[in-house]
Image (spheres, grey):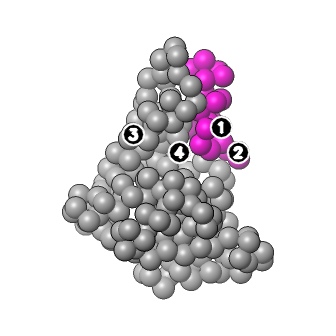
Amino acid sequence: MRIAVFASHNGSNFQAIAEACKSGRIKGEVTLLICNNKKSQAIARAKNLGIQFFHVSETLEPNEKKRDKEISSLLNEHNCELAVLAGYMKKLSSAVIDSFNGEIINIHPSLLPKYGGKGMYGLAVHKEVLRNKEYLSGVTVHRVNSEYDKGEILSQQTISICESETPESLAEKARPVEHHLIVQTIKEIIEEKE
């Protein structure tokens, strides 16, 4: 299966997916990375892994329709069957979602439907979880539709919270869980299609 990954910052989930493909754990290939941040660590990771990357952002192209067309064209030109939003800090437009024939999934650092929606990403999620004195958090992989974090939930894994937890320590706990869950979910999606 030909996979496109979208990332904005660190790119550790992108790397986990690419390495799982290279090792044969996922029967697929990451054919491209789409990034909206030219300073993203994900771009450096793509270079190291020999994966094509494209910077598509408002800075380069202020016109949203043109950006959407560029993203749609990249997915189609590379014959992508699965798009994975892995720490991508932009909402995909309905135009991109509707024009893509494959499946689009997202990884989110909470147990959706809790702590999802606009502005709920990264440390903002972990801060809210701790502010509400939750004793459990987790990671969710879900299908993407035109609403923030509202698509069908495909998989979830819980993370226990200790009394001394900080947003940063919770993010550290979540990272390996994210890597495991996104790889496992992609593996299951591919196996279902075989």
Q: Position of residue 64 (x, y in %)?
A: 75, 73
User: Which residue is under mark 3?
Assistant: 177
Which kind of residue does numbered mark 4 sit on?
His
Whether residue 74 appears in this view of the structure is yes
Range covered by the magenta-colored residues: 112-134
Callouts 1 and 2 close, C-beta under 8 Å: yes
User: Which residue is under mark 4?
Assistant: 108
Q: Nearer the viewer, residue 119 or 43?
A: 43
Q: Residue at x 78, y 75 (%)?
A: 62
Q: Residue at x 44, y 77 (%)?
A: 52
In the image, which is nearer the foreground, mark 4 or mark 3?
3
Residue 119 within the magenta-colored segment of the rendering: yes
Which sits earlier in the primary sequence, circle 3 or circle 1?
1
Looking at the image, residue 58 sits to the left or right of residue 116; the answer is right
User: Which residue is under mark 2?
Assistant: 119
Instruction: Report helix, strand or loop for mark 4.
Output: strand
Q: How far apart are marks 4 and 3 (CA)?
A: 11 Å
Which kind of residue does numbered mark 1 sit on?
Ala
Instruction: Report helix, strand or loop for mark 2.
Output: loop
